Amino acid sequence: MAVSSLKDAGPARAGLRVASVLACLALWQAASSAHLNLGVVTFANTPGPVEVGGAAVELVRSSQLVPHLTASLARVFAGYAAAAVLGVAIGVAIGRSRFANDVLLPPLEVLRPIPAVAWIPLAVLMFPSSEGSMIYITFIGALFPIVLNTIHGVETVDQRLIASARSLGAGRAAMLREVILPGAAPSIVTGLAIGMGTSWFCLITAEMISGQFGIGYYTWESYTLQNYPDIVVGMLLIGLLGMGSSALLRRAGEFATPWRRVGRAR
């Protein structure tokens, strides 16, 4: 009964979500057209959806879109891939070993609150090219969410499963492969999805300061040239790319952890 009612409510929920987006666009257009001034915030110079849509069409027709997208995607996925591999490895080590916890976690906790903007001057000094510095910024942004969620997943694996595997004679490698990683997989997937979003945030910040191509550079250049509709186009591209890449990761995580779907169905 509950499952069927949820399925019946699917189209209604989808329609409600579409309606909410359309309502926001309508309010945005009305505020922009009326040059609404609320005192605290004003829409006098804010482009509306119609202007932004026109700017988006122009960008698609131009030759600028592909170089900007290619540059940003290459930087994000290079930094993110390194962060994913290293972050999961560090998280598993800290979650499973007291020695690794004592040695690795304190410096990570000191570095974790430092924002991406603060890393940019040091990254420029550390790397001979701006490309290397921007990839490093995306790496730093993704690393900490992945590490922390992996630690949480490893530490919350059911101890009964670990005890059962030990009683069956499982060694360290088998324990890690058959029990720890599958048990921690939901938290790892969550960390990977959060890390992807953080990578985009950090990359855009780096591109605004030291990039010559990329969505962040395009957005900042639009501001300096006073092409205000293009600013919103850049913002929307960032949001769509971040949302899409995170959604792909969640889908991949669901595919890689079929036991979670079985548990939800029950």
Image (tube, rainbow, N blue to C red):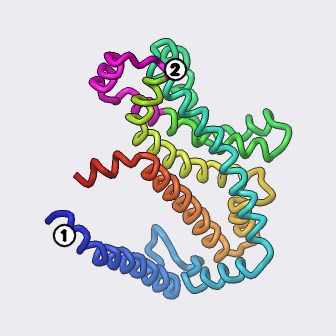
Q: CA distance from mark 2 to mark 1?
A: 49 Å
| Boundaries of the magenta span | 148-173
Residue at point 30% right, 23% down? 159
Quarter of the image holding residue 213?
bottom right
Q: Residue 23, how many percent across, how many down?
A: 39, 81
Furthest-right residue in view? 128
- Left of 14 or right of it: where is 136? right
Q: Which residue is labeled 2 in the image?
A: 106
Residue at point 71% right, 82% down? 58
Q: Give, as a three-letter code, the residue at label 1.
A: Ser
- Left of 216 or right of it: where is 33? left
Q: Compare residues 78 and 17 and report the one nearer the observer.
A: 78
Q: Compare residues 30 and 238 and report the one nearer the observer.
A: 238
Q: Which residue is labeled 1 in the image?
A: 5
Check whether the beta carbons of the residues at disc 2 and disc 1 lie within 8 A of each other: no
Q: Residue 69, how many percent across, how many down?
A: 71, 64
* Figure check: 11 above or below 72: below
Q: Earlier in the sequence, mark 2 or mark 1?
A: 1
Count of numbered circles in the view: 2
Q: Compare residues 30 and 89 and report the one nearer the observer.
A: 89
Secondary structure found at label 2 = helix
Furthest-front residue in view? 168
- Whether residue 13 is visible, yes or no, is yes
Secondary structure found at label 1 = helix
Residue at point 22% right, 51% down? 266
* Figure check: 185 above or below 90: below
